[in-house]
Image: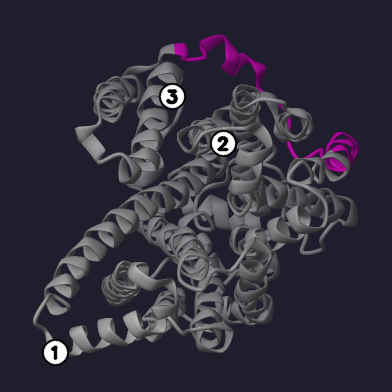
């Protein structure tokens, strides 16, 4: 049975002691701990899946709750804002309460909040329960990442890391598929009810099987309430700005400007508390570790690719192709299959080659996928999107395995719980920043192309006049309304083409980003290998 953080006499700055402890660990995986870990992984899967499974069916939820278009966006914003606060807090709570208690509370609270979301009769109730669901459930995600390195010997990470990487990336990818099926076959309520039975099972399994560590309740005596308040203001307000900014003209909106000011002021207070508190709510010293800092940067960019592309594909298929949620999910399932196929390959390669090279290949695969989308037209369908999605899925798995190992796998065991929260926070922030940036760029480029196309189809332009005359003839049966109908049809075509051109520009931008981050891998310092005998990479 592998040792826990409490039983290992480690010092944070002594890598030899870490290696010696790992070398002495039993290489056998305890079946009880494996089953417990798999239950925790399933809990994490539910928490991550819940973001995309709901986003695919917001229209149906809006109709069911009689909500306005402004109100329905809060179903997602409330969840993400609460979750982004909970993720970094989980490191402290895991050390104070222990993995068993924290994860059981998270799973049970997430399950209860899911049930209440499904039973909500108004948009106000839904928003409250979604915030509770995001905050309580957010603790499951980093706890699983940390546990993987605390209970399994380093020689087994080539099996364990691809598993949690697959869950962390697959859940958002197949979310639209599952959401579409549930909404189409049953109703939007089942987007939440589906969590109840598995959630109860995960809670029971956690209480029964998890015995990885012991709580340190003395930490709660010095709990930094001011630090928590400042962190909530900093990250929560920032998440709100990033979520609502693209829809409401950023700082031109008074509420967004106010939240941006709150975030900035809270950030100052947060960093002051982190540097001066006796027991800071979050320990940022993990960023002093070169590997962790670089790995977190890559995780940030991976978040842009993960959540950004999960957003762009459905947006194109919905707006341009007119697909419903079920059809979008079926089209995007290709990426999930590619992840499944690549996961064992990524795990095997992670133990045999320099992780920098695997990172580079992963992000270059991302770039190949996005570059393949730069020639997009309004006629693209499943088969045109096939290879870009395959490259995206394969690149995701090839990148996340070495990123996780570089960032977390070489840290001293007593720092892993806290570092896992920061690592996952960086991925989520990358997704939030990426979505806000992609939305803004897409809107700006669409406006630019609309202006240019309007100039190209102005009066007196031969081809434009010819198309307009042909459309007018087609609507002759409508009598005097024919010219107006033809002009409206031409305007819709122009807007549609401008939107497609905007998508192409965004994919060019993403290609440049992924190539740039891949090239930066060449200047990385190779992570120090795990000490001989540890069986690591």
Residue 363 as seen in the image, left or right of residue 405: left
Image height of 405 relative to 100, above or below: below
Give the alpha-carbon distance from disc 1 to disc 2, as whole Å: 49 Å
* Relative depth, front residue between 107 and 154: 107
Residue in the image at 45% along x and 35% along y: 70
Which range of residues does the magenta coloring cover?
Answer: 200-225
Q: Which mark is residue 75?
A: 2
Question: Can you give x and y, in whole percent of width and height, for residue 446 in the image?
Answer: 26, 64
The image shows residue 27, relative to residue 453, as above or below, that is above
Task: Write down the quadrant of residue 64 in the picture.
Answer: top right
The Cα atoms of the two marked residues, 3 and 1, are separated by 59 Å
Question: Within 10 angstroms of label 2, few (less than 14), some, or many (20 or more) residues?
Answer: many
Marks 1, 2: nearer the viewer: 1
Residue 5, above or below 162: above
Q: Is residue 136 left or right of residue 269?
A: right
Please give the residue where the numbered disc 1 appears in the rendered image. Answer: 462
Viewer-nearest of discs 2 and 3: 2
Mark 3 Cα-neighbour bin, 10 Å: few <14, some 14–19, many ≥20: many
């Amino acid at each position: 049975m592998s040792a826990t953080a409490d039983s290992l006499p480690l010092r944070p700055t002594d890598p030899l002691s870490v290696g010696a402890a790992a070398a002495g660990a039993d290489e056998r995986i305890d079946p009880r701990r494996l089953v417990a870990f798999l239950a925790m992984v399933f809990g994490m899967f539910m928490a991550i899946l819940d973001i995309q499974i709901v986003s695919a069916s917001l229209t149906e939820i809006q109709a069911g709750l009689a909500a306005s278009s402004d109100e329905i966006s809060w179903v997602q914003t409330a969840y993400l804002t609460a979750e982004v606060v909970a993720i970094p807090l989980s490191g402290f709570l895991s050390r104070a309460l222990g993995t068993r208690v924290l994860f059981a509370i998270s799973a049970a609270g997430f399950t209860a909040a899911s049930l209440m979301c499904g039973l909500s009769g108004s948009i106000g109730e839904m928003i409250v329960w979604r915030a509770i669901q995001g905050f309580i459930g957010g603790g499951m995600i980093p706890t699983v990442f940390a546990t993987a390195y605390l209970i399994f010997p380093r020689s087994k990470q080539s099996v364990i890391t691809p598993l949690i990487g697959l869950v962390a990336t697959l859940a958002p990818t197949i979310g639209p598929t599952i959401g579409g099926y549930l909404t189409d076959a049953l109703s939007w309520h089942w987007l939440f009810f589906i969590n109840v039975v598995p959630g109860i099972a995960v809670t029971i399994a956690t209480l029964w099987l998890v015995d990885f560590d012991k709580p340190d309740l003395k930490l709660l005596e010095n709990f930094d309430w001011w630090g928590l308040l400042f962190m909530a203001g900093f990250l929560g307000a920032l998440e709100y700005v990033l979520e609502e900014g693209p829809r409401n003209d950023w700082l031109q909106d008074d509420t967004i400007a106010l939240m941006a000011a709150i975030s900035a002021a809270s950030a100052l207070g947060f960093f002051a508390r982190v540097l001066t508190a006796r027991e800071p709510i979050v320990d940022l010293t993990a960023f002093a570790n070169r590997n962790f800092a670089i790995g977190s940067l890559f995780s940030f960019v991976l978040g842009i690719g993960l959540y950004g592309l999960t957003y762009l594909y459905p947006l194109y298929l919905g707006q341009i192709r007119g697909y419903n949620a079920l059809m979008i999910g079926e089209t995007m399932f290709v990426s999930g299959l590619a992840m499944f196929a690549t996961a064992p390959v990524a795990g095997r390669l992670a133990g045999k080659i320099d992780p920098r090279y695997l990172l580079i290949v992963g992000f270059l695969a991302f770039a190949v996928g996005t570059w393949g989308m730069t020639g997009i037209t309004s006629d693209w369908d499943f088969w045109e999107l096939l290879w870009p999605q395959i490259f995206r899925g394969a690149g995701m798995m090839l990148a996340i395995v070495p990123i996780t190992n570089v960032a977390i796998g070489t840290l001293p065991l007593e720092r892993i719980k806290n570092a896992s929260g920061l690592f996952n926070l960086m991925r989520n922030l990358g997704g939030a920043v990426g979505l806000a940036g992609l939305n803004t760029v897409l809107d700006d480029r669409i406006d630019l192309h609309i202006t240019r196309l309007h100039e190209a189809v102005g009066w007196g332009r031969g081809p434009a006049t010819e198309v307009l005359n042909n459309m007018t003839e087609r609507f002759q049966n409508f009598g005097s309304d024919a010219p107006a109908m033809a002009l409206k049809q031409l305007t819709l075509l122009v807007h549609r083409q401008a939107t497609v051109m905007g998508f192409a520009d965004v994919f060019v931008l993403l290609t440049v980003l992924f190539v740039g981050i891949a090239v930066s891998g060449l200047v990385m310092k190779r992570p120090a290998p795990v000490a001989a005998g540890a069986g690591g990479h």
